[in-house]
Structure formats: C-alpha cells, structure tokens
Amino acid sequence: MGERAAGPPLNPPSPPPVPLEITRANQWDVKIRWSDGHEAVYPALYLRQACCCAVCLERPAGQGPEVDREVHPLAISAAGTYGIEFAWSDGHATGIYPYKYLRALCPCPQCRRLDANTDA
C-alpha cells in the first residue's frame, strides 16, 4: 500500500543543448546556434585561451597559454558527436572543445548573469 507504480519520471530532464549551426561571426570569431534557441558569438582569443587540451591544462595555475591577440581559427570541424576541434593560426590544433564545455563558456551577458547567480 502507498507504493507508486514504476514508470518514466514525471518530468524527464531535457537533453543538453547541442550546436545546430557553427559559423564565423566575422573574420575571426565563431558563432554557434544551439538546439535550445540560444545564439552566441565566441571571440577567437577567448576560445583559444580557454583550450582544455592536455598541453594547455598542464600549465601552472594562472599561466594559461601566451596567445597572439590576433589568433583565429583556420579550420573548424566536428569531433565526433560531442565536440568541436579548431586549427588555430598559432599552430595549435590538439584541443577538443566538448559541447557542454562550449556552452558553459558562453560569453554573452545573459549566460554570464546566470553563472554569477549560480556561483552565489
């Protein structure tokens, strides 16, 4: 008595957003249109400095890669079904940016406010 019938959750979680379109916002920056309707422009320097490859992550804290301020992607390609790879103008091409990571990096004011509220 009092037991609930097994079945699917009442409100199943929605799938995480994935890119529907990845284009250049201008000569250097990257624009992503996400499956939840959000659109974001990622400055090239911001993305390059946020590289999460093993080489970049092994640097001491606070000593991210020294990057040319004019760095830009030479090529953008899918990494399976979970991320994006960039070939950068500074010769770096080993990092994969998972979709979840890219979405968390979104530099738009709306996402930055959400992050600030979550961290508080």
Image (cartoon, rainbow, N blue to C red):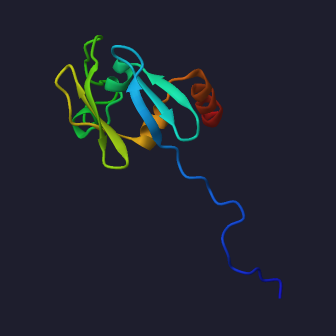
Give the percent coordinates (x, y) of residue 64. 30, 25
Give the percent coordinates (x, y) of residue 15. 55, 52
Q: Is residue 62 visible?
A: no
- Horizontal side, residue 21 vs residue 80: left or right: right
Reply above or below: 23 against 54: above
**Residue drawn 34% across the image and 18% down it:** 45
Q: Where on the picture, by quarter, is residue 116?
A: top right
Q: Where on the picture, by quarter, is residue 95?
A: top left
- Horizontal side, residue 117 vs residue 54: left or right: right
Give the percent coordinates (x, y) of residue 77. 29, 36
**Nearest to the observer: residue 43 or residue 119:** 43
Q: Residue pushed farthest left?
A: 91
Q: Residue pushed farthest right?
A: 1
Reply above or below: 9 against 106: below
Q: Is residue 114 visible?
A: yes
Reply above or below: 6 against 87: below
**Residue drawn 64% across the image and 60% down it:** 12
- Horizontal side, residue 32 vs residue 62: left or right: right
Q: Residue pushed farthest top?
A: 70
The tally of labels here is: 0
**Nearest to the observer: residue 12 or residue 24:** 24
**Residue drawn 66% across the image and 71% down it:** 8
Q: Where on the picture, by quarter, is residue 78?
A: top left
Q: Quadrant of the C terminus?
A: top right
Give the percent coordinates (x, y) of residue 7. 67, 76
**Residue drawn 54% across the image and 23% down it:** 108
